[in-house]
Image: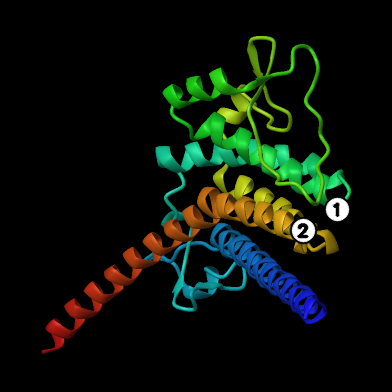
Amino acid sequence: ILVPLKMDAVVAKMEEQLERKRNIHTMLEKRVANLDYFYRIHHAGCETVAPTSSSSSSSLKLASPIYWMNVVQLYKSDFNYKSEETQKRAQQWFSLGLSLAPLLQIENGPTYVRSLVQLIEEFDYHFVTHPAVQGVKVLISKNFGSKAPPASAEVDTAIKGKIVKLGNAVMYEYLRIYNNPIAQSLDYFEVTFALCTVLKEVYRKLDHESSFGRNMYDAIMRVDSRFKHHFFGFVAKELEKASAHIVKDQVSDLDTLLKSLS
């Protein structure tokens, strides 16, 4: 009786791991495709001049047109890239991209995933967490004195990020903050291009045999959810808003034309 029960447990464990493997592969394919699409949409928007009443259609095509959701062609003027919120995001993405790039040199596996988890923890703490909550996190954070925290991670242990102190100061292990004037006047499109490129490599490195265990899987999915919140979700929302505005204007123009003909 014990042997079949053990075999059932082994089979169930293998099935769970295969399911996690399928989920990760599906997620990686989707994210890489999303990043490529975002890059091309923004690049086409930058390279294409919006039509005007005095310009001929032949002079407008400086790049192959790409349509958001195969419906609307976006131009640079359609992007709300000068808004305070968008500029704030650009500064955050600039820091995120420069912080992610060095992690690509880490060998694929638990240590790499652990570095991503830690970076996201530090990014959320610095850019998202309310100052009052930051104070609480500092109070309960571990103090490593004058030594840096260990950078290793194991497959069979939960991978969690944490805010740490060296003495009385919070120390970022991976997050890079840039407060110079260049970081205050960033080109939204250039930052988007760069982050799309870096994130594609970040996701590709997650396709590793060690990624399908429970702890690694949970950590990868947490990292992905934060990337969705900080980048994918915001970009998609801005594109949808711009597209909806264009469609609304086009429908209004069509209504006006039909009324004039009636």
The residue lying toward the viewer, choosing from 23 and 182, is 23
Badge 1 crowding class, 10 Å Cα cut-off, few under 14, some 14 to 19, many 20 or more, is some
Where on the picture, by quarter, is residue 19? bottom right
From what the image shows, is residue 73 above or below residue 80? below
Q: Which residue is mark 1?
A: 108
From what the image shows, is residue 153 above or below residue 137? below
Secondary structure beneath dot 1 equals loop
Name the amino acid type tagged 2: Leu
Q: Which residue is mark 2?
A: 206
Please tell me which residue is depicted at 73% across the width and 33% down the height of the picture. 174
- The image position of residue 177, as x and y in percent, is 65, 27
Secondary structure beneath dot 2 equals loop
Of the numbered discs 1 and 2, the one sitting upstream in the chain is: 1
Measure the alpha-carbon separation of dots 1 and 2: 7 Å
Please tell me which residue is depicted at 78% across the width and 82% down the height of the picture. 4
- The image position of residue 69, as x and y in percent, is 48, 75
- The image position of residue 24, as x and y in percent, is 69, 67
Q: Residue furthest front?
A: 1
